[in-house]
Amino acid sequence: MKQISVRFCVGCGYICDKIQPEGDQPQWMNAHTYLMKHGLRWEDLDRIDDACPPCARVLACARRGVFPDVIEAATAP
């Protein structure tokens, strides 16, 4: 089987679902859920290390030296 390239969040381990996204935008989901949804195994994936939107916000705050309470507020739903 040909490997499928997927964006893998190095912060939380979620995978970006571009195969069958719910809605207009790709959805980040738990890796186990992604694998089960598409009938895949880890060996089928070509991981591209990335960061999901919430983890990207945390990383951006950390780079700027923002305090943890600001990070918490930035990642709240």
Image (tube, rainbow, N blue to C red):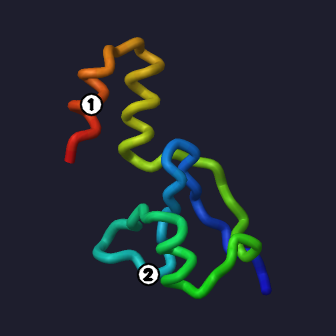
71 sits left or right of 37 in the view: left
Q: Are marks 2 and 1 in contact (CB under 8 Å)?
A: no
In the picture, residue 65 is in which quadrant? Answer: top left
Residue at (66, 55) in percent of width and height: 48
Which residue is the site of mark 2? Answer: 20
**How dense is the environment of label 1, judged by Cα within 10 Å: few (below 14), some, or many (20 and up)?**
few
* Depth check, front residue: 20 or 73: 73
Which mark is in front, 2 or 1?
Answer: 1
Q: What label does residue 21 carry, if any?
A: none
Instruction: Identify residue for label 1.
Output: 72
Residue at disc 2, secondary structure? loop
Nearer-N-terminus badge (2/1):
2
Residue 32 x %, y %: 53, 70
Q: Is residue 47 above or below residue 17?
A: above
Quarter of the rendering containing residue 1 = bottom right
Three-letter amino acid code at disc 2? Gln
Secondary structure, mark 1, is helix
- The x, y position of residue 10, in whole percent, is 58, 45
Residue in the picture at 70% in, 71% down: 42
In this rendered view, identify the residue nearer to me: 12 or 17.
12
Above or below: residue 37 compared with residue 53: below
The percent position of residue 13, horizontal first and vertical second, equals 54, 53
How far apart, in angstroms, are the residues tagged by discs 2 and 1?
30 Å
Q: Looking at the picture, how far across and down is residue 62, in whole percent?
A: 44, 21
For badge 1, the amino acid type reads: Glu
Q: Residue at x 29, y 75 (%)?
A: 23
Label 2, residues with CA under 10 Å away: few <14, some 14-19, many ≥20: few
The residue shown at (61%, 65%) is: 6
Residue located farthest toward the front when viewing the structure as drawn: 32
